[in-house]
Each structure stands twice: as C-alpha cells, then as structure tokens.
Amino acid sequence: MPFSVSWHTLLEELDELDDGAELITPLSHDRFRVTDVQEHRVVVTFGDTGERRPLQRDQFETLYRRIQDSDDEFDLDRLPPDADPYPAVLSLHPRFEVDEQEGVIIEKEETTDTQLLSDESASAESDRVEPDGLDVYSDALLLIDALERQDVSDLTALETDALVNLYTLCSDVQRNANDFRQDIADVLLDRLHHDQPVHGQYGSVQRTSRRNRSLKDEEEVLATLEDAGIDRERVTSVDSKKVNEALEVTELSETDIYEVDESEYVRKADVDEDVKESRLQGLKDRLAASSDTESDELRQEIEALEERIDDLTSFSTGTQMQG
C-alpha cells in the first residue's frame, strides 16, 4: 500500500479526535495534544511545557518505510532524538500499534491499540499509590518535603537544625535506596543476557560479570610458588592483624608502627523515628487529599499547621548528641 493512502487515513483519524484528547509518547511518557492537522504536517503541543512542535509528513513516511523494511516491526530505540511523538501519532492509524513492553512499533492487519489516553488511564497515571512497606518511599517523601520548605541554593545560610534534618534524611534515603536497588538487581539478573542492554524510560542496564580473588591457604600458596622458583621472602609481607596482636603484648605505641592521619567527618548519630512518622503521615494525608485545583489553598493550611509543630521536628544539637 502506498504511503499516501496510509497518510490520508491517519489524517482522517486525527480530524476526528476530540479537542482535549491526549496522547503519550512511548519512550519519555510525555503527554501532548494534536492542535493542528495540515496536509503536510501535524502540529502537537506538549502539556507540561506548552511547547508546540510540527511533525512533518516526510518524517512519518520515513518511519513508515522503516517499519516495512524491518518485517513490519521497528525498534523504538532506533528513533532519532525528539522523534518520540511520531510513533504515538502513527498509532492512531488503525494498522499501527506501539508495544511498549517490547519497545517496538508494529504494523498489523487487524485493528490496533493507540497511545491515546482515556479519561480512566489519565486519571490512573496521575494518582499516587503508596507502596506498602517500602522504606525508601517514606524517606524520599520526607526529603522532598524538607527540600521544598528550605532554600538549598545556599547551604551556608541554613540553620544548623535544618542541615541536620537534610543530612539525616539523605543518609536514610541513600541506605534504603541501595537496599531496594539490590533487590531489583537480584530480579533483573534472571531477565538479562550478556552484551544485550535493556532500556527503560530513564536509562538502560546490562548484565556484566566481576572477578573476585582470594588467596588459598598460605602454606599451599608459598609451596606452589617455591615449586615455580619463587622465594617465599619475595611474596611474604607484614600482616596488619598480626601486628595489632603484637602491639598488645609490647610497650610499643601505635605511632611507632603506623603512619596515623586523622580526619574529621559528619556521622548520623540518631534518628527520631516518631517525629519522622508523624511528619510522614501528614504528607500522606496531603497527597491523598490534594488536587491540582485545591493544592495551593491546602499548602497554605499545612504550612500554618507546620509552624506550630516545628519544635517537634527539630533534632538534638551536636552537643546533646555527643553527651
């Protein structure tokens, strides 16, 4: 079938779209609307930024040819930069469909699905759902709240207790995120193959391997090397563990044996879990109750409430923690 036929079929589908209809790009998941349909181009407007972008007919034809040349299936990762809207718009044609799970756009004989957002799917995508029992979610939510309430462009201007709060929350997020990352990696290992990157919306991952070495029994190693003509004196060295044991039974000081270099650093000393839980519950209530139209008014009410409980959200001073 010549592209001109498919193009005019696509234009007819676009003409029938409701004015408020939204589509979503398959890779970046950006929302946009079709705001103008012309003979040689389609103009779209992105909802988040208001950016208007013309999508040219010849670029649609290029995508159409690549799909046909690839056995009716084209890998979305091969799209050039900023070309994400093209497959989303083309999916409105009754013979083209985006398979996000496989990362391809496909030409089919039967009627296909589109990248058009229904009212239900748009609502579901905007709804926040709290994951059950995920510590990193709770700590990340608290950190976001703290960052929104503080001007962190100049850390030196912040009060000490605010810095302590931010440091503690960053530490908790880092620890719990790393634990969660490892859980995810354990599952991904069963789904990845060597030298075959798998792509997602925000990046890609690849299975790889790492070699870890540990010496065999000391006498076995020394005997093996001596058999190969290597004197044991060439490979023996001072064992720090044995040196420490020797220091305990002699009158030598630590500095007689070690080069000692002291440095200072900040370490999290304590976390007030009750305060965190109280603040977290308030944030969850805000997320559950707020909407785009009422969020500003609700924020003002919450800020007034937070002013009355600021004393409860303060950590102990450095002197008190050391005592």
Image (cartoon, rainbow, N blue to C red):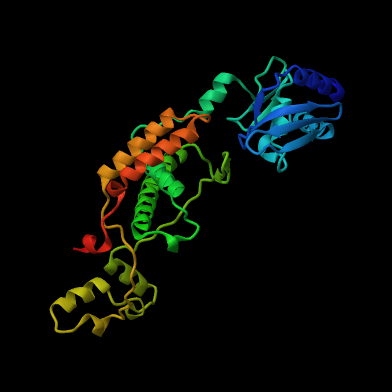
Among all residues in the image, which is located at the extreme left?
A: 249
Q: Quadrant of residue 229?
A: bottom left
The tally of labels here is 0
**Residue at screen point 78% across, 19% down:** 15
Q: Is residue 182 visible?
A: no
Seen in the image, is 190 located left or right of residue 22? Answer: left
Residue 285 is situated, as x and y percent measured from the top left of the image, at 38, 31
Q: Quadrant of the N terminus?
A: top right
**Residue at screen point 44% across, 51% down:** 150
Vertical placement of 69 versus 275: above or below?
above
- Residue closest to the eye, 274 or 181: 274
- Residue closest to the eye, 203 or 72: 203
Q: Quadrant of the C terminus?
A: bottom left
Q: Quadrant of residue 138?
A: top left
Q: Quadrant of residue 182?
A: top left
Seen in the image, is 208 located left or right of residue 15? Answer: left
Residue 124 is situated, as x and y percent measured from the top left of the image, at 51, 24
Q: Is residue 205 visible?
A: yes
Among all residues in the image, which is located at the extreme top?
A: 110
Residue 247 is situated, as x and y percent measured from the top left of the image, at 18, 78
